[in-house]
Image: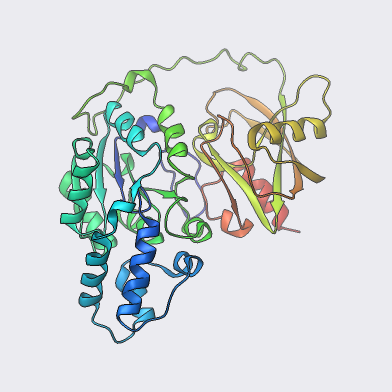
Amino acid sequence: MPNIPGRGARPCAPTEIRNIIFDWSGTLFDDFEVSHHSTIATLKAFGGKHISIHDYKEHFVLPAWKFYRRFLKSADMDAVTHFYFEYFMHHIEKGKLYPQARENLKRAKEAGMRLFICSTVRQDLLEKMVRHLRIGHLFDGIFGSVRDKEKRLPNICHKLGLRKDRTIYAGDMEHDLAAAKKTGVLSAAFLCGYQASHRLLDAAPDFVWNDHGSLGKFLDKIPPPLRGGGRGAGDQEVTLSLTLPPRGGGDSFPIPTVGALIFNKGDIFLVQTHKWSHTFGIPGGKIKKGETMEEALKREIWEETRLKIKNIRWALVQDSINSKEFHKLDRHFLLLNFIADTDSRKFRLNEEAESGFWVNPRTALKLRLNQPTRVLLNHYLSF
């Protein structure tokens, strides 16, 4: 893994992850509409004002009492919490597991991972939902009624004896990511949940998953030797065979590739891919015989993202020689980097990337960028 200024190298290969701790609401269970309506009812009951979906995503925080204190300055927080969960309980049947969530839990379990839940949802209600959905057997522990995850998550990991470098805490709130960092485990942000994406990205998660489709792509990278590991595999050492490619990677000359910082409304588009050790980077690829650089760039971007680019400008060229970040050893790339624009923020990823997102360029510097992307972004920001 790369050493990013201010952050240590962190292991991120799926083969090294043995434990995943999930938040519940907005991560495994889609109850956003129920929660929003429950919040509206709670605010009204205690003399507060109506809150829109946009404002709810922008302002909701954990621990929840901080959110309610902002809108109900003099209310008793215990009474507020009790009212919210009573209302929430009577409408919870409108919630559902996210698409592919059940399948991902099964696949992770079959790969020998230990799975847990750590949630602010009240313990009895959480256990009731898990039983109703018939997924309780997939978890090694369920921890509800966690009012402050930054305080509780370190204790949970210590009690369970989880290796920090082999554990991910996945959630959809800044508080989830802060709890992971305080605990010393890897952090994963689901962009499909409660909080606005820009706030999650600003918290610099180690992984970004658009939804459970992205998590599924991550789990796809677990090699066959790990599948069928069964229960109890835990944090055991895993030995994988590795066949080194011929010196030079089978190529007699450096491989020319193209890639671009793509802009829309001041944000840039990044992807997370196993090819570059699950770091964040720009889309791009190899030039085909007979293609110009610009033709190759447009084709690669379209194939990988379905984004049409325009206003293509030259940026710089970089050597990437035997990069430890790249998934194949002994490769020499000539990275031809460009700047480009697009009119659309809608994208569709092919199989190469696990996730993609738009992010402010300076926020991007907080992320675990691969080295070539960091060099390109710093080059752009220097002007």
Q: Residue 353: percent from the left, percent from the top?
A: 55, 35
Q: What residue lies at 79% left-to-right and 19% top-to-bottom?
A: 289
Of 360 and 93, nearer the camera is 93
**Residue 45's quadrant in the figure?**
bottom left
Identify the image's colour scheme: rainbow, by chain, secondary structure or one colour: rainbow
Of 109 and 99, nearer the camera is 99
Of 101 and 8, nearer the camera is 101
Q: Residue 340: percent from the left, percent from the top?
A: 76, 46
The answer to whether any part of residue 370 appears in the image is: no
Q: Is residue 360 above or below residue 14?
A: below
Q: Is residue 152 above or below residue 290?
A: below
Of 320 and 93, nearer the camera is 93
Q: Residue 103: percent from the left, percent from the top?
A: 35, 32
**Residue 100's quadrant in the figure?**
top left
**Residue 335's quadrant in the figure?**
top right
Q: What residue lies at 46% left-to-right and 58% top-to-bottom?
A: 203
Q: Is residue 50 left or right of residue 271?
A: left
The answer to whether any part of residue 233 appears in the image is: yes
Q: What residue lies at 22% left-to-right and 38% top-to-bottom?
A: 134
